Image (spheres, helix red, strand yellow):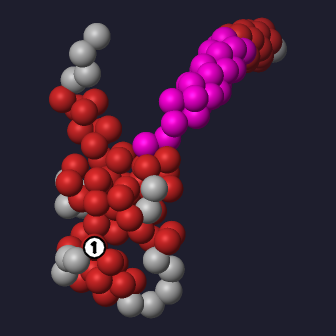
Amino acid sequence: MAASGSDNGDLVRGIARRAGAWLEINYAGGSKDKRIARDLAISPGMAKQLRGGRGWTVARLDQVIGLWPAFRDFVFPPPDRLDQLAARFELLADELAALRVELRDDIRAMREDISGLRGDLQTR
């Protein structure tokens, strides 16, 4: 099934946020925008945009991957990692489904208890 425009937008935003987070993590301390700007040959303002997860392009991603190969795995997790995450999400979904059933049963039992108490009060 093809991804919808919204799915693509979410994917792009996720990549941009992770790329910005990578810069935040790897440029700790003061003057980070100036240091990023120097390393990437961009303005400090553009560096600030990138750290905020905005302004990323394919060319910029390629540039950063060329400078720091570890960036690739941070921004684009390896497929086996994605498979692990998908399996964990499936387990969580199953647990949530079981909890929903349990909650519905509990709510039904509480309603029956309340109904019985109302009946007891009305007969007194």
User: Left or right: where does residue 96 sit relative to residue 124?
Assistant: left
Tell me: residue 32, above or below residue 2. below
Where is residue 84 drawn, in percent x and y?
62, 28
Residue closest to the far bottom: 30
Query: What is the span of residues highlighted in magenta in the rendered image?
Result: 76-104
10 Å crowding of disc 1: few (<14), some (14-19), many (20+): some
Q: Is residue 42 visible?
A: yes
> What amino acid type should be assigned to the residue bearing mark 1?
Leu
Residue closest to the far front: 66
- The structure residue drawn at horizontal position 46% and vertical position 77%, both measured from the top left corner, is 27
- Give the labeled residue for mark 1: 40
Q: Quadrant of residue 10?
A: top left
Q: Observer-nearest residue: 60 or 109?
A: 60
- The structure residue drawn at horizontal position 58% and vertical position 34%, both measured from the top left corner, is 81
Magenta region, mostly helix, strand or loop?
helix
- Tell me, yes or no, whether the highlighted magenta stretch contains residue 90: yes
Which secondary structure lies at badge 1?
A: helix
Where is residue 53 drawn, in percent x and y?
31, 60
- The structure residue drawn at horizontal position 29% and vertical position 53%, both measured from the top left corner, is 62
Q: Quadrant of residue 124?
A: top right
Q: Observer-nearest residue: 68 or 55?
A: 68
User: Left or right: where does residue 47 sit relative to residue 68?
Assistant: left
